[in-house]
Image: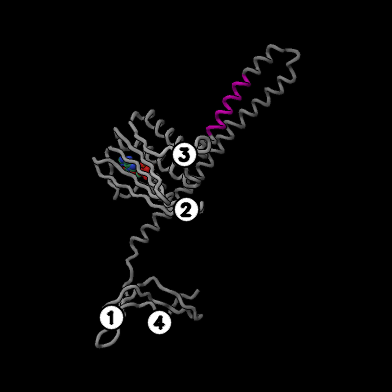
């Protein structure tokens, strides 16, 4: 594509007469005759001496910083995904495949010896049952790591109640949950709400040193709102995040992917408030 342009100011969307007008954009012409809009706002000023066009090149520092942060996040998230796949592969190999191999060898032994050594065969079968129980446990654990099965098994509200109960049990911090028992959300909204509560509570457990936490989930017409507030140490949100800190960034990405937003309010000594707003579709199709 030829990016050299013939600067060609069109009188099209320029607005206002006499005073500097805002809202116009500069149009360029490619050498092949195509017109394209440039990201350069133009103002027009009419004076006694004629028309003047003022170009206000945008300051792209912030845009570039956000883009750089997004790229870094995408790379780090990808690395984590690969690491996670390697871990699951290792667990499948070490836990499941090895247990199944042992069970296969034991089964062969029982087949070949049950008639001649029935007592030893019963003892072997008892061991095999234990191995089977461990293997079932390992399978459940690996699957639960991959996806919050609780959500499928229990539904959103009981799954969140479980998260909150588990949080209090693990770190001894009281957590008040306010949610309509009847709340139901379809996917991917239910998983997003679950993951956001999960990460926010993990942050409280890890960083806040709080004595109280409150989780509120509200479904209003056409949107779901979620807040997680703690009374812990708080932090300075303006400080650039550590490269390995992906939790809050992940929350933001998750909400944005669903057309929503997240606000994180925190100040040293004044606790932290995570607020999320996600618009819900009318018909089941994400907006
Ligand atoms: N509830 C909280 N209370 C105090 N500090 C917090 C809280 N949540 C997040 N932080 C701060 O923000 C940083 C970034 O959080 P996050 O992106 O989740 O990464 P990580 O938890 O892996 O450090 C944390 O390291 C911590 O300093
Ligand atoms: Mg975190």
Residue identified by numbered label 2: 281
Q: Which residue is mark 4?
A: 8
Q: Which residue occupies 28% across, 37% down?
A: 231
Label 4 CA crowd tier, 10 Å (few <14, some 14–19, many 20+): few
Which of the numbered marks, if any, corresponds to residue 65?
Answer: none
In-front residue for pair 171/91: 171
Where is 46 relative to 146, above or below? below
Q: Are marks 1 and 3 in contact (CB under 8 Å)?
A: no
Please check the rendered image and state whether residue 129 is part of the magenta-colored stretch, yes or no.
Answer: yes
- The answer for how far apart the CA atoms under marks 2 and 4 are is 42 Å
x, y percentage for residue 124? 65, 17
Residue 54: percent from the left, percent from the top? 30, 77
In primary-sequence order, the first of circles 1 and 3 is: 1
Calculate the distance from the C-alpha at mark 1 to the C-alpha at mark 2: 44 Å
Q: Which quadrant would residue 172 be assigned to in this image?
A: top left
The residue sitting at 69% across, 11% down in the picture is 119
Q: Position of residue 19 (x, y in %)?
A: 26, 79
Q: Residue at x 37, y 36 (%)?
A: 177
Could you say which is closer to the camera, residue 287 or residue 5?
287
Secondary-structure class at tag 3: helix
| Residue placed under numbered mark 1 in the picture | 45
Mark nearer the viewer, 1 or 3: 3
Where does label 3 land, which residue? 156
Q: Which residues are magenta?
A: 127-141
**Looking at the image, is mark 3 or mark 2 earlier in the sequence?**
3
Kindly identify the residue that appears in the image at 33 percent across and 75 percent down: 42
Q: Position of residue 157 (x, y in %)?
A: 44, 37
* Mark 2 touches mark 4? (CB < 8 Å): no
Q: Nearer the viewer, residue 101 or 39?
A: 39
Q: Nearer the viewer, mark 3 or mark 4?
A: 3
């Amino acid at each position: 594509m030829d990016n050299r342009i013939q600067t060609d100011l069109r009188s099209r969307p320029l607005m206002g007469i006499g005073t500097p007008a805002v809202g116009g954009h500069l149009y360029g012409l490619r050498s092949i005759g195509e017109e394209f809009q440039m990201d350069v706002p133009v103002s027009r000023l009419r004076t006694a001496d004629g028309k003047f066009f003022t170009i206000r090149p945008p300051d792209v520092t912030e845009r570039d910083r956000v883009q750089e942060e997004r790229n870094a996040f995408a790379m780090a998230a990808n690395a984590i995904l690969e690491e996670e796949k390697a871990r699951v592969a290792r667990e499948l190999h070490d836990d499941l495949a090895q247990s199944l191999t042992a069970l296969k060898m034991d089964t062969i032994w029982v087949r070949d010896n049950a008639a001649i050594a029935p007592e030893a065969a019963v003892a072997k079968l008892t061991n095999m049952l234990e191995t089977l129980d461990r293997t079932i446990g390992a399978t459940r654990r690996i699957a639960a790591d991959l996806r919050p099965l609780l959500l499928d098994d229990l539904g959103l509200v009981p799954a969140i109640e479980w998260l909150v109960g588990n949080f209090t049990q693990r770190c001894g911090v009281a957590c008040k949950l306010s949610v309509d028992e009847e709340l139901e959300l379809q996917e991917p909204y239910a998983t997003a709400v679950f993951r956001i509560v999960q990460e926010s509570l993990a942050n409280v457990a890890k960083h806040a040193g709080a004595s109280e936490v409150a989780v509120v989930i509200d479904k209003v017409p056409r949107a779901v709102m979620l807040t997680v507030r703690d009374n812990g140490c708080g932090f300075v949100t303006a400080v650039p995040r550590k490269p390995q800190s992906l939790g809050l960034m992940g929350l933001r990405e998750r909400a944005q992917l669903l057309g929503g937003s997240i606000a994180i309010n925190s100040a040293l000594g004044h606790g932290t408030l995570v607020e999320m707003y996600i618009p819900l579709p009318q018909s089941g199709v994400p907006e």
